[in-house]
Image (tube, rainbow, N blue to C red):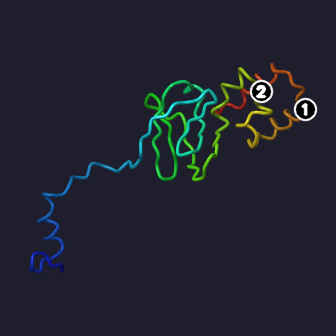
Amino acid sequence: MSRVRNCLLPLFEIFETERPSLVPYVGPFDGFHAVPASVSKTCLVRFDKNRYSVEARAVGRPVEIRAYAERPECWQDGSIVGKHVRAFGRDNTVYDPLHYIPVLARKPRALRNGAPFKEWELPRPCGAFSANWNGKPAVIVRWSIFLVPF
């Protein structure tokens, strides 16, 4: 029993009296904060004092960052071009090496020294190949084809 306007009413009756003033349910709430951003030449967007990678096709065009509590999503033309776990520090750079696969076709040596690939653990056959690699770009271009997810 609950007390409303100096009378005792069952909870369901209180709900029925307040129902006309309630907002109707329209589906799950998608709670995010939208922020426009530009993509740098290095496939990075700045958000909340950190940098996040996006797909190479997004370079030079604006994106919308949808900031959820646990992740930022980068949207461009109605599709996601980047999604990461949110970094809560300052001056962090969060890379996804798969965003840079098209860049490897133009700059194959980036696989050895590029920042997105520094901490990337390659599959065992690729790692053995890179250990014996003699620096021929043509070999790396053919090799990068195997890194694309199917």
| Three-letter amino acid code of the residue under disc 1 | Asn
Please give the count of numbered marks on the rendered protein.
2
Image coords of residue 107 (percent x, y): 74, 23
Q: Is residue 140 left or right of residue 88?
A: right
Element class at badge 2: helix
Residue 36 occupies which quadrant of the picture?
Answer: top left
Per the model, the C-alpha gap separating discs 1 and 2 is 13 Å
Q: Quadrant of the C terminus?
A: top right
Q: In which quarter of the image is residue 6?
A: bottom left
- Compared to residue 123, the image places residue 71 above or below, namely below
x%, y% of residue 16? 13, 65
Per the image, the residue denoted by label 1 is 132
Which label belongs to residue 143? 2
Amino acid residing under circle 2: Trp
Residue placed most toward the observer, 21 or 10: 21
- Dot 2 alpha-carbon crowd within 10 angstroms: few under 14, some 14 to 19, many 20 or more: some
| Nearest to the observer: residue 50 or residue 85 | 50
Residue 44, position as x, y percentages in the image: 60, 34
Judge the density around disc 1: few (<14), some (14-19), many (≥20) Cα neighbours within 10 Å.
Answer: few
Residue 111 in percent (x, y) is at 77, 31
